[in-house]
Image (spheres, grey):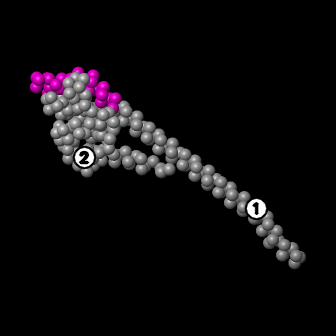
Amino acid sequence: MKSLRKRLPVLFTVMLLPVLLFTAITLWVTARDMRERVLEANRSALSYYVQELDTTLSLLEDYLLNFAVNDNSVSKLHSADTNARAIAKAEVFERLRFEYEIYGADCIFFYCPSTDCYITVYSSALNYQDARELREMVTGGYEDYLTDHRWKAGRLAGDAYLYQIVETAVNGPLVYGALIDIAAVQERLSASPET
């Protein structure tokens, strides 16, 4: 009986040790596999968001180019007739007002240097000071800010934006562009889990 009492804890330990070891290894392998799956899901989500942002910027760029080249009202911004120019300005503004949010822009603007006609629409993400600084920048010497159909990062009144400013001469000299608030882009990126 005494020998059984001494052997029972040893026997119990010998039987329990492999079970505990097997459980620990299984938990470690499962945790490692789960971590790898989460990392892959995060990479996929981040890749998807970057692709979505790239597509949004490309669609906005195509829209602006098409609008600048093909819209009849835009070509009338060069008119010497102030009434025709005022009507064209109102038509361009109304169309932009309804379409700029579709393309994810916080601001879209058109500027006709020959008639000093400036049209802009912007969301609440762009404050009045930023809008005024943009106008001064474009109307006061846009040549330094042209982006050659590329998106660049820059600051207006201390706020960071992605911007594109393009000059075309299809219907006369015309400068157009768009701004996207970088804070909104960063917010979406930081909402994506880090890899």
- Indicate whether 123 appears above or below 79: below
Instruction: Give the amino acid type for the residue marked by disc 2 in the picture.
Output: Leu
Any part of residue 108 in sight: no
Tag count: 2
Please tell me how crowded label 2 is: few (under 14), some (14-19), or many (20+) other residues with Cα within 10 Å.
Answer: some
**Quarter of the image containing the N terminus?**
bottom right
- Compared across the picture, whether 65 is left or right of 193 comes to left
Q: Which residue is mark 1?
A: 18
Is 84 colored magenta in this rendering? Answer: yes
Please tell me the numbered disc located at residue 165: none
Residue 134 coordinates in the image, percent (x, y): 21, 41
Which residue shows up at 48% across the image and 43% down it?
45
- Compared across the picture, whether 52 is left or right of 178 comes to right
Which residue shows up at 84% across the image and 75% down it?
6
Q: Secondary structure at mark 1?
A: helix
- Compared across the picture, whether 187 is left or right of 155 comes to right
Instruction: Give the amino acid type for the residue marked by disc 1 in the picture.
Output: Pro
Q: Nearer the viewer, mark 1 or mark 2?
A: 2
Please tell me the numbered disc located at residue 156: 2
Q: Secondary structure at mark 2?
A: strand
Which residue shows up at 22% across the image and 23% down it?
171
Between residues 164 and 82, which one lies in front from this camera angle? Answer: 164
- Indicate whether 19 appears above or below 151: below
Q: Which of the 4 image quarters holds residue 64?
A: top left
Magenta stretch, residue numbers: 61-88
Q: Which of the 4 image quarters holds residue 13?
A: bottom right
Residue 71 coordinates in the image, percent (x, y): 25, 23
Q: Main secondary structure of the magenta part?
A: helix
Any part of residue 183 in sight: yes
Is 77 colored magenta in this rendering? Answer: yes
The residue at the far bottom in this view is: 2
Residue 18 coordinates in the image, percent (x, y): 76, 62
